[in-house]
Image (tube, rainbow, N blue to C red):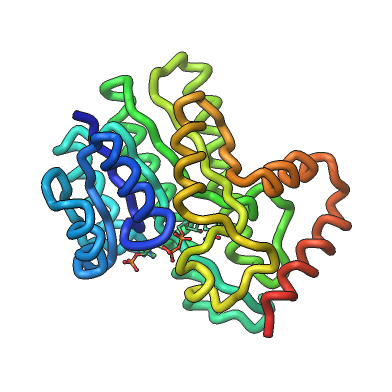
Amino acid sequence: MRTACITGASSGIGAEFARQLKGKGFRLILVSRKNKNLEPLVAELAPRGITCIEADVSKPADCEKIAAECRRQNVDLFINNAGFGSVGNFAESDLDDDCNMIDTNVRAVHILTRLMLGFFMSKNSGYILNVASIAGLLPGGPYMATYYATKSYVVSLTNSIREELRLAKSDVHISMLCPGPVDTNFNNRAGVVFALKGISAKSCVRYCLRKMKTGTEIIVPGFPVRLASKFIGLSPRRPLLAFTAKQQTKKLN
Ligand SMILES: NC(=O)c1ccc[n+]([C@@H]2O[C@H](COP(=O)([O-])OP(=O)(O)OC[C@H]3O[C@@H](n4cnc5c(N)ncnc54)[C@H](OP(=O)(O)O)[C@@H]3O)[C@@H](O)[C@H]2O)c1
């Protein structure tokens, strides 16, 4: 039986990965800052084959704890999903909140990817999925500057590792999920309303799991966002930043 570990499994996209992977017969290791946040999901999925880890991925020692359990249970699939955003003028942003976002969206992904990659390479199998965002494919995101920057880091890191694995002819896989708006708790945490209609976490994850099987590098669910993503590389930077700023401004009240 295969085993998957999902960070940020207590709600939204992470909880949906848990549901759909359980449905495919995976054993699960679920991570949340509070075990009680996982209780409804564990009750829904039936507790057999599920391990809960109470860990705050923004703390390196907690990342070590997660990786140790993954090694112990010989994990096959690791999903770096925990993350959050916030909106506002950068000059007025809360520096503690920004640094916590960098620790969660960047440092934790870096540490966990490194630790899990080492383990997967030692057995020459395994899959790492990094949950980035369409934000990470854009040149920047005025009024959500820190969030966009964190997701760009995830995109760049994942691209580089993927190429290293390809050159090494490794059987270890890495790819990234880059969604546009998804209807989850993300908005409440970020204090925003989406400028575009979101897709459901269910369809986002269903699409992602399908594309992971085909070896897709950058997985973008939802046709309109996927179409838009094709133009990002072709569009001049300045108008793209102006357009993004306009979209983000709609989220500011
Ligand atoms: N929703 C969107 O529109 C959207 C679009 C693009 C990308 N994404 C990305 O998708 C991922 C999942 O977000 P979501 O939309 O599903 O949001 P969500 O419903 O708010 O879920 C976020 C999850 O992350 C966990 N989490 C947050 N900080 C954590 C920490 N320090 N340590 C451990 N767990 C932590 C939360 O768990 P606890 O509170 O229980 O710890 C929660 O389970 C994020 O990386 C986000 O950037 C979302």
Up/down of 219 relative to 99, above or below = above
Between 163 and 253, the residue placed more toward the observer is 253
Q: Which residue corresponds to the image point at 43% horizontal and 62% vertical from the top-left? A: 103
Q: Residue 54's image quarter?
A: bottom left
Residue 23 visible in the displayed image: yes
* Image location of residue 98, percent across then percent down: 52, 72
* Image location of residue 168, percent across then percent down: 47, 16
Quadrant into which the C terminus falls: bottom right
Up/down of 1 relative to 37, above or below = above
Residue 107 shown left or right of residue 242 in the figure: left
Q: Which residue corresponds to the image point at 38% horizontal and 40% vertical from the top-left? A: 114
Residue 115 visible in the displayed image: no
Q: Which residue corresponds to the image point at 61% horizontal and 74% vertical from the top-left? A: 193
Q: Quadrant of ligand 1?
A: bottom left
Q: Residue furthest left?
A: 48
Between 115 and 2, the residue placed more toward the observer is 2
Q: Residue 213's image quarter?
A: top left
Up/down of 124 relative to 227, above or below = above
Residue 56 shown left or right of residue 179 in the figure: left
Q: Which residue corresponds to the image point at 69% horizontal and 72% vertical from the top-left? A: 143
Quadrant into which the N terminus falls: top left
Q: Residue furthest top?
A: 169
* Image location of residue 4, percent across then percent down: 28, 40
Between 252 and 122, the residue placed more toward the observer is 252
